Amino acid sequence: MAIPVTLTIAGSDSSGGAGIQADIKTFSALKSYGCSVITAITAQNTQGVQKVTLLNPDIVVEQCKSIMNDLPVRAIKTGMLGNSEIILALADHLESYAALPPVIIDPVMVSTSGARLLDEEAVHIFKTQLIPKASLITPNLHEAAALLKTDIPTSIDEMKALLNDLLALGGKAVLLKGGHLQKEKSSDLFFDGNEVTSVTTPHVATNNTHGTGCTLSAAITSYYARGYSMKDAVINAKSYIYQSLLHADSLRIGQGYGPVHHFSAWWS
């Protein structure tokens, strides 16, 4: 069986709901072989993050070398990178590949609550060194505002107004995530420079949303590695995360904000 290999470069979530663990679950659910480069170790659960230890940039790069020198990676995604040193080391390393696989960048720099996860220097390096290597970037509304140093969009029209500027950062395409901008539905905007596609599902009322962004970008990566166009990968990934949210309450994991159900289509 020829199975596409996918690589996630991100932090480890000890509770298994987000980060590396969510990505590997998503890759597996969507029929790609997942491997990982870990950038950070976190102590966290469904109630919050207790401690974060960032790894040395050297071991981050060495992990990447080990995988890329052996496994036929078809698509890469990045998540939590942590600081400017890791971002710069990773960007320099990716630059060394003559045939770099497509890179889907989830810019984990501002949480959905608005908390900053990267300082200004790291954001600048991220924008200038890493985003230009992206086949797709998937910012949420807070991240888009931070990248462009503008106000957070409050409507679909304001989201659309940011798309050209986000694309101008150097990536080949943008998926701007609308999240809970609208009460009845969840609308994301995909833009590849040619047309804007609204990718919309009904809003799911659940507190179990931990790892939603990681899971969506991993799903896009898996579908793209399997040969889907980027637009179709986004549409299918949006459907997957909708189903994962729709069945999330059946898991009953933890006492806080639990994970989405990555295997809802396979578990009865």
Image: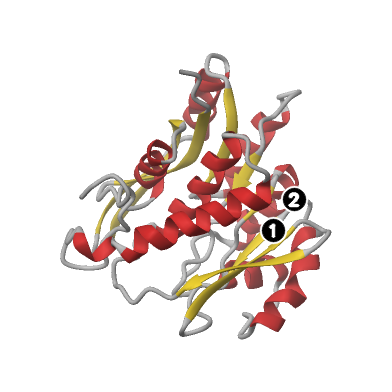
**In this orientation, which residue lies closer to the viewer: 17 or 57?**
17
- Viewer-side label of 1, 2: 1
Say if residue 140 shows up in the picture: yes
Dividing the picture into quadrants, the one containing residue 151 is bottom right
Identify residue for label 2: 171
**In this orientation, which residue lies closer to the viewer: 36 or 129?**
36
Residue 79 horizontal/vertical position (percent): 50, 48
Give left or right: position of 70 versus 173.
left
Residue 25 horizontal/vertical position (percent): 35, 41
Label 1 SS: strand
Q: Amino acid at mark 2?
A: Gly
Q: In which quadrant of the rendered image does the N terminus lie?
A: top left
The outermost residue toward the top is 70
Q: Which label sits on residue 174?
A: 1
Label 2 SS: loop
Say if residue 81 shows up in the picture: no
In percent of the image, x 21 and y 68: which residue is there?
A: 256
Residue 232 horizontal/vertical position (percent): 63, 50
Give left or right: position of 124 versus 143.
right
Give left or right: position of 178 versus 15.
right
- Classify 3 as above or below 216: above
- Classify 97 as above or below 222: above
